[in-house]
Image (cartoon, rainbow, N blue to C red):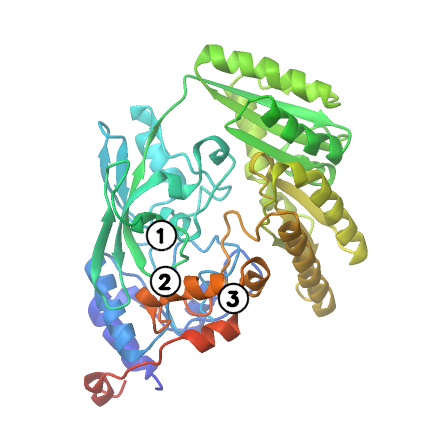
Amino acid sequence: MPVNLPGLVEHLRKIAGRDAVLDRPEDLMLYEYDAGIRKSTPGAVVFPQNTEQVSQIMRLATALNVAVVPRGAGTGLSGGSIPQEGGLVIAFSRMNRILEVDVENQRATVRPGVVNLQLSEHVAHLGLYFAPDPSSQKACTIGGNVAENSGGPHTLLHGVTVNHVTGVEVVLPSGEIVYFGGKAAESYGFDMTGFMVGSEGTVGIVTAITVKLLRKPEKIATLLGVFESVDDAALTVSAITAAGITPAALEMLDGWTLRTVEAFCHAGYPLDAGAVLLIELEGLREAVEEQAVAVTEVCLAQKAREVRRAKDEEERALLWKGRKMAFAALGRVTPSYYTQDGVVPRSQIPAVMRHIGNVAKKYDLTIGNIFHAGDGNLHPLILFDMRNAEQFERVLSASTEILEFCIQCGGSITGEHGVGMEKRDLMSRLFTEEDLDVMISLRNAFNGRDILNPQKIFPMPRMCREITGPSQNPVLMQEGM
């Protein structure tokens, strides 16, 4: 049924406060995009301050059959926090408190709007930190990390977000507040906490998160392997794993990308290299020193031109500044870029990198590569100008070919950025009809009317066919809504 937007906004203001709702076009423009390439303007944005307000908002939205899209910091890369057809965005920037730090159990409980890096900074004096570290960790929120099951360079050793979340508080579409998991390392029965992580806001809205905190390692060694070619660097990734070494981080930059980054950050990357591997080891002092020697030997055996080791914390921070600021560096040389997120077995990295090069030539595009090589999580960055419609279509075709090749190599279409709206139509290439039926039935058990983050993850024809029809609320209809 049609929704009276001014009436909806007035109800939202009664729930969250008059200054907690945006409905002017000039304000809504700030919430029509994320870090991807799509845009769609919401009908309204609301900023709740607590779980009870989220519950009331969901009861209202469900009664009115209004689509709701949860949003963290908007740093996502798959269109997950963008409303498809108007609807209501629930922004969590005001739910940003660290509720508890339990040092004895190495746990913290936070609101979804807490910035990722803020948590590690908050517990640094205790010798603790939060391991998942997306490149956007200075801006992205833990709620968004939970929705997308985000990773980061240092999750090669410790695992992605799902491996560090032990409990969640969730508001369902009905407004019901439920609790899954807690502080314990393991829970019995269905793993509902794990199910919520990575569900992209399609089954419930997470309003509090309990996470693991890790002890800072005794020793860290940061190495930079310099190679003449992408192939040599890619082959080295598998060779390091074959040697029985699992670094904390194993990142790769191709020659074009590292030169672009170096011009921006002055991180000390060699301008004449074909590729570099940024390798970090952590643990007990003696073990790290042994691994540093072993990794150096492996790199040299795989045709590395040289292997540098950061001599102090300042040099280490500079090398990582180059990696963390790489996406920003590209903004100096192109109006837009499209970041992909395919995953392949490590042994397939050389073949995929060659395929990406061929795709770039085929579509006359520049594609840079900077990615989590240790777990085969590729991030090809396709440069283009959004104002050029023909070029934009070439970018979409190139992106699809890259992800399809990842699937052919035994991989996936996403490792940490989520499916969202960007890759939903590729889900049918990755899963069978029966697979998708099971997934949709699970989604429908919580969100049968597709109120929460509609038109995400699943191919559109299937979604339209599977959604349960809406019901109407006679009380709200009498109020003209």
- How far apart are the two marked residues, 3 and 1, measured between alpha carbons? 21 Å
Residue for point 53% across, 30% down: 249
Crowding near the residue tagged with mark 1, few <14, some 14–19, many ≥20 C-alpha atoms within 10 Å: few
Which residue is farthest front? 434
- How far apart are the two marked residues, 1 and 2, measured between alpha carbons? 10 Å
Q: Quadrant of residue 365?
A: bottom right
Q: Is residue 424 above or below residue 63?
A: above
Q: Is residue 320 above or below residue 181?
A: above
Q: Which disc, if any, is residue 59?
A: none
Comes first in the chain, label 2 or label 3 = 3
* Residue 263 visible in the snapshot: no
Query: Where is mark 1, residue-wise?
Result: 195
Q: Is residue 141 left or right of residue 478?
A: right
Query: Where is mark 2, residue-wise?
Result: 442
Q: Nearer the viewer, mark 1 or mark 2?
A: 2
Query: Where is mark 3, residue-wise?
Result: 433
Which residue is farthest top? 286
